[in-house]
C-alpha cells in the first residue's frame, strides 16, 4: 500500500459547517467527504479537458477529411522538409556535444498506403509490427 501524504486545508466557519453537514448526510467524515468530492471534481475536469467537443458542422468536416484519400498539402511537405533540415540535425548534434544523450525521432501514423509511400519518399521507415507507423531519425 502506498504511504499516505498530508494535505492541509484552511476553511472559514461557513465552509466547514457546509462540509460537515454534507459529510453527515453521506455518513462519512469531513475528510472522507472532501476527499471524495475533490476526486470527483478533479476527474471530471481532467476528462473535460482531454475531450474535444465539436459542433455538428465541425464534426462533419473532420469526418470528411479523415475519410478523404490522403493528399499531402504544402504545409505537410514543408514540415517534413523542416524535420529533415540540417538545422534540426545540428540542434541534436549540439545537445550530444554538451553531454545530453537524446535521440530525436519524428513519428507519424499514415492514414493509408498513399500516405505511407509519401512518407517513405522523404526517408521515413515503417515499423515492422505497425507498417502505417513510420519514423524519421533526426
Image (tube, rainbow, N blue to C red):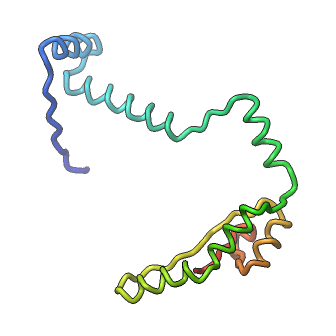
Q: Which residue is drawn at 68% across and 74% down?
A: 81
Q: Residue at x 52, y 76 (%)?
A: 104
Locate residue 117 relative to residue 54 in the image: left or right: right
Locate residue 92 relative to residue 3 in the image: left or right: right
Q: Which residue is drawn at 47% across and 86% down?
A: 93
Locate residue 99 relative to residue 30 in the image: left or right: right
Q: Quadrant of the C terminus?
A: bottom right
Nearest the viewer among 130 and 83 is 83
Q: Position of residue 74 (x, y in %)?
A: 77, 63
Residue 133: image quadrant is bottom right
Q: Position of residue 42 (x, y in %)?
A: 38, 34
For residue 49, above or below residue 94: above
The outermost residue toward the bottom is 97
Q: Where is residue 41 in the image (x, y as percent from the top left)?
A: 38, 29
For residue 95, above or below residue 115: below
Q: Which residue is drawn at 15% across and 41% down?
A: 6
Locate residue 135 relative to residue 120 in the image: left or right: left
Nearest the viewer among 26 and 113 is 113
Residue 45: image quadrant is top left
Amino acid at each position: 500500500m502506498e504511504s499516505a501524504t498530508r494535505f492541509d486545508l484552511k476553511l472559514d466557519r461557513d465552509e466547514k459547517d457546509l462540509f460537515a453537514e454534507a459529510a453527515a448526510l453521506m455518513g462519512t467524515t469531513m475528510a472522507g467527504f472532501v476527499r471524495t468530492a475533490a476526486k470527483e471534481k478533479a476527474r471530471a475536469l481532467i476528462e473535460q479537458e482531454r475531450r474535444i467537443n465539436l459542433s455538428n458542422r465541425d464534426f462533419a468536416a473532420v469526418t470528411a477529411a479523415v475519410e478523404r484519400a490522403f493528399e499531402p498539402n504544402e504545409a505537410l511537405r514543408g514540415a517534413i522538409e523542416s524535420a529533415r533540415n540540417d538545422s534540426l540535425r545540428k540542434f541534436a548534434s549540439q545537445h550530444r556535444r554538451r553531454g545530453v544523450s537524446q535521440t530525436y525521432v519524428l513519428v507519424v501514423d499514415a492514414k493509408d498506403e498513399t500516405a505511407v509511400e509519401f512518407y517513405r519518399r522523404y526517408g521515413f521507415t515503417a515499423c515492422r509490427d505497425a507498417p502505417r507507423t513510420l519514423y524519421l531519425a533526426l
